[in-house]
Amino acid sequence: MGADFGYFFLQAGTDAGFFNVLVEKFNEGEAWMWPVLVALILGLAIFLERVITLNLADINTRKFILDVQQALQDGGIPAAQDLCAQTRGPIASVFQAGLMRADEGVEAAEKAITTYGSIEMSFLERGLVWLALFIAIAPLLGFLGTVVGMIEAFDAIEAAADISPSLVARGIKIALLTTAAGLLAGIILQVGYNYCVSKIDRIIAEMEESSITLIDSIILMKEGKQIVPEEGSDETQA
């Protein structure tokens, strides 16, 4: 079966072209292929929007933390706030929220970071619910086409009072094509969903880790201690 499957794609690429074969199979699947295609297109649109948004939200976190620490050391909280305002991404926004409350104490800054961090997390995850919906709907639409195709096959048998392969071939073919289309759409969207979730998890982890560093830096600043180790010091060399 694996050899036949590979031969199908090989022949599709050499004879009529893989895209032409897909169009041909889509047309053979008839009306039930369209809902699956719509679910795939809408899911891909959400995926592409999330990819663009997440890439824009992704920054060099390590460099940004060092820049904020340097700004705190050189110009205090106002300088660090200006740097955060000029930097895109959820981490900069969370930092800015914490710095705005830093004058009220470390606890107030921590509370602001936690609250605003939850808001930024919801922004990052926005749209994933709809993507998950289309992941579930696409295979179900395919299975629905399968049921309809099998019903048509049995209707043809009942009308002809005969079990000739030519009578049931059309209905069974529609059933198999819609099933394959639904599963393929679901697989494609699931891969995109997992990519978005993994990227969001990484951004959130960096946000939490960097927030701890910010709080520590604020504490050092209030105590009048060195935030960024001087070059050549023992801490830097370590």
Image (cartoon, rainbow, N blue to C red):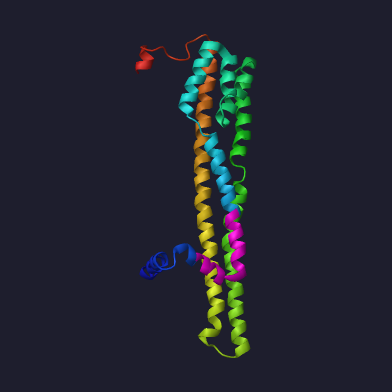
**Hey, which quadrant is residue 175 in on the image?**
bottom right
Task: Check the image and name the residue furthest to the front.
Answer: 16
- Image coordinates of residue 148 in percent, x first then y, are 61, 73
Q: Is residue 180 visible?
A: yes
Counting the numbered discs, the total is 0
Instruction: Kindly indicate the quadrant of the structure image that contains residue 9.
Output: bottom left
Q: Is residue 167 above or below residue 49?
A: below
Residue 107 in sight here = no
Residue 88 is drawn in which quadrant? top right
Residue at 38% x, 15% y is 235
Q: Pick whichever, 104 or 163, lies toward us.
A: 163
Residue 37 located left or right of residue 238: right
Question: Which residue reaches farthest top?
Answer: 224
Rendered residue at 59%/42% (across/down)? 125
Indicate the quadrant containing the C terminus: top left, top right, bottom left or bottom right. Answer: top left
- The location of residue 153, given as percent across then percent down, is 58, 80
Q: Residue at x 57, y 55 (%)?
A: 135
Q: Which residues make up the magenta segment?
A: 22-41
Q: Position of residue 101 (x, y in %)?
A: 64, 19
| Residue sitting at x 60%, y 15% | 78
Q: Nearer the viewer, residue 221 or 189?
A: 189
Q: Which residue of the protein is positioned furthest toward the bottom in this rendering? A: 161
Task: Residue 159: give x, y in percent of width and height.
Answer: 63, 88
Q: Any magenta on residue 94? A: no
Magenta span: predominant SS is: helix
* Quarter of the image that includes the N terminus: bottom left
- Check residue 39 for magenta coloring: yes
